[in-house]
Image (cartoon, rainbow, N blue to C red):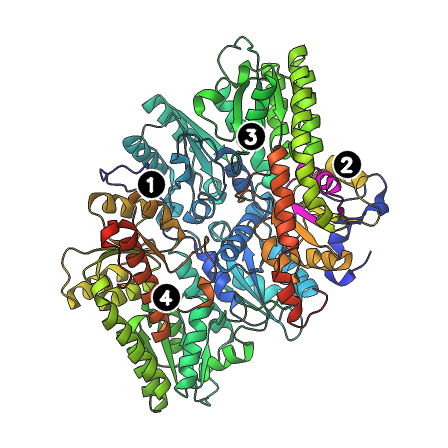
Amino acid sequence: MLDVTPKKIAERSALRINPLKTCQPVGAMYAALGVHNCMPHSHGSQGCCSYHRMFLTRHFKDPAIAASSSFTEGASVFGGGSNLKTAIKNIFDLYDPDIIAVHTTCLSETIGDDLVTYITDAKIPEGKIVVHANTPSYVGSHITGFSSMITGLMHYLSQNTGEKNGKLALFPGFVNPGDMREMKKLMTLMGVAYTMLPDTSAVMDSPMTGEYTMYPKGGTTIADIKDLGNCELSLALGEITSTPPAESLESKCKVPFQTLPLPIGIELTDQFIMALNHFSKNEVPYAIEEERGQLVDILLDSHKYSQNKSVAIYGDPDTVLALAQFTLEMGMIPKYLVTGTPGKAFEEKATALFEKYGMEGCTAKGNADLFELHQWIKNDRVDLMIGGTHGKYVAKAEDIPLVRAGFPIVDRYVHSYLPLVGYKGGMRLAEMILNALMDRQDRDCADEDMEMIM
Amino acid sequence: MGNENAVLPERAQSIRYSECSGDGSGIKCEAESISGAVSQRACVFCGARVVLNPITDAFHIIHGPIGCASYTWDIRGSLSSQEEGYRNSYSTDLRERDVIFGGQKKLAAAVDEVVATHSPKVIFIYATCIVGVIGDDIDAVCRDAEEKYGIRVIPVKSPGFSGTKKTGYKMACNAIMNLVTPEFLPEKTLGVNILGDFNLAGEMWIIKNYLRRIGVKVVANITGDAKVDDLKKAPTAQLNLVQCAGSMTYLAKQMEEVFDIPFIKVSFFGVTDTSDSLMRIAYAVGDKEVIQRAKVFIEEEKNRVLPLLDKYKKNLIGKKAAIYVGGGFKAISLIRQFSEFGMNTVMVGTQTGSKDDYEVIQSLVDDDAVILDDANPAELEAFMKEMGADILVGGVKERPLAYKLGVAFCDHNHERKHPLAGYEGTLNFASEINLSMNSPVWETISQGGKENV
């Protein structure tokens, strides 16, 4: 960091330096915030809850509400049952949500708290709901926690009543409210009736009204989550993140599912649109076709500036994979793809992508960290980096332009309001990438090479 | 007591109108938070981490699952004059296997890997929540590593659940004592230690510069911009200056006992506190020349800064401030500072204030001011509205809350990028408050239909 990274790469098996992931509960909290009138609840020490709220607040620049069981020495010895019982009572008394979404922490998991029993034994007021997800911090990453909370919500609530509702169940993946809005826009344009879980739009990007509401307007309603069991099909966007919830909905309510990568760039958005078309049998409206055409036009106009530029992309697995595909569409070389999230799927999918585009000399690694990426870059540099804020020290040390995309972005504004997905998101990404590359060209060129028209 | 709806019955004892209690004994504080409250408090690990993190040439290995390392990675704006290694995040990233079979081996291997790539003088190893539960003996790992490499490897026992953030401060202080305690008590030199300044946005440098100007030598900075070798000289100082009382009084008392170093509490927030503190330091050091120099210096600075402050003051007079910060000492400083600007503090709360702090706070605010301990967003919202606060001073979680309510905000937490200490800091503070309260953005909001934002 700020360049104390040695160039020589030493094998590490025990030490994680500069992580590209965080722990499950923060993902679970984010998922729960995408449920209407929901209070996320952290069953563990107080610090976890504060850290997670802070982490989300830094990225979204919006309040992230959540309560904590506030474990003490006593709870860690005798179990957190009484803490949770008290918490449930207090939350309903004081904050009056419709639903409490409890997630666990490494501490409550390690001492073996049995959440199912605790919740069954708790006094829950008439018409109120408590659900939970097991989210041990020592398994997976925040991505896993996000998936687990979606699964937990459906496990408690979704029912197949035998009457189909004609809707598509959409799992949007670990994306920003701006992305969710774009997905909803496209589904509406395609005439698809849908339920999206979670939906953090109008929660984590809520407008300024002069009023503070603990539960903003947005979020998937409990009625809709219950009704997920009657959907015709579920569509999981971001295969690594969204496949587990789609599978659980299938096994619980017999809803068939389809998985797709996050719809970033042309081909992946095409796939999303075609899946919607397949579902609704509606023609693709001209408005969508026009957007696609505009994006293709942009890529054509600008290909000279992106062609053969090498890029390092780091962050969450589905986001990195989809971004990589888009850079390939721009004629770039996704030389390094890294995620902190463990699991083999990431490397397999990345390798398949390299093969599909005939890329040689590109490397992908899951369960990796930023320190390692920095060392790779030191030994063989790239023209551009794409990822969250934490890469900025690497970018500065190696003097490489950085495009911020993904999670977390804690040093910029507006990013969470606007999409990366869809053709519109593609235009935004293309603009960011081209600006970064072309600003750099302007900065580095000799005076006599400075051009007004590029 | 207004706002019954926003307050849990159990919380009622932790909230007071200043007049209710009369002697400060009325507020319930330093207690465990209630389960289910949306508390703004952090944990033991967080307390330990923020105190030790600024030691620039130490290596900080967090033994636990990845989260604790991720959330505390370079979040303090503690600047360094040389080393930057402390701004990296090192962790054992414990996985399920480690939880089942124990993480001790992995920790030892992590120490080996740090030593292999860097040449650390000191390694701090933080134990997080589950380390004790899974039975890892970090003391043993530290002992073995010290023997193996001949460096200091110091355990920091900070499982999150084992108290409040304050407990973490104590653990950090113990670790510092562990590091600086020599075999034999050294000769005293002329000079002071600064305890409890973390060099946020370079504040330690501002304070050190003042001391240089009045002729007082600084032996060790604890822990802002600290280096291990300087820390080890700490026992030779003649006096300890305690700036963040919440985190460092405990260390000062230990140093008094073990090294025979007296301490005074100082504050460099605001013109009054800064001037008073400099004079008290000068008298405590007791050198005539220093006292004279301090007088002259303070006079010069006041003459320089007060006219500049007056420029802001006309925008600030009569405005109402709300404060929600971590420690009581900072809250007290802030109340005084607002008074300097002609502003009235109508609500004040802390996460970890002590009874003594609350007594002082009560003596500084009006009878109808609200005082809260360990508040939650619902309470903050209710009382800011009720009291008609114009600005909230707080940290990262309070910022969006204030903005959503249409209340201006000033970050006084450890993330801030502007020094708020000393005379310069006071100017920055006034300018920041002025900027936030008088930003044109409020005009655009009231055009949106809500007239009284």
Q: Distance between the residues labelled 1 and 4?
A: 26 Å
Instruction: Give, as a single range, the part of the protein colored magenta.
Output: B322-344
What chain does mark 2 sit on?
A: B
Answer few, some or many: residues within 10 Å of disc 3's Cα (few below 14, many 20 plus, some between 14 and 19).
many
| Residue at the spot of label 3 | B206
Callout 1 amino acid = Leu
Q: Residue at x 24, y 53 (%)?
A: A383
Q: Distance between the residues labelled 1 and 2?
A: 46 Å
- Cα distance between the residues tagged 2 and 4: 52 Å
Foreground: disc 3 or disc 2: 3
Closer to viewer: mark 1 or mark 2: 2
Mark 1 neighbour density, 10 Å: few (under 14) some (14–19) many (20 or more): many
**Location of residue B304 in the rendering, given as x and y in whole percent from the top left corner:** 65, 32
Looking at the image, residue B143 lies above or below residue A218: above
SS at mark 2 in the image: helix
Amino acid under disc 2: Val
* Circles 3 and 1 on the same subunit: no
Which residue lies under the disc numbered 1? A15
Magenta stretch: includes residue B253: no
Residue B336 included in the magenta stretch of the image: yes
Quarter placement of the C terminus of chain B: bottom right
Where residue B156 appears, as percent x and y from the top left, is 49, 33
Left or right relative to A432: residue A152: right
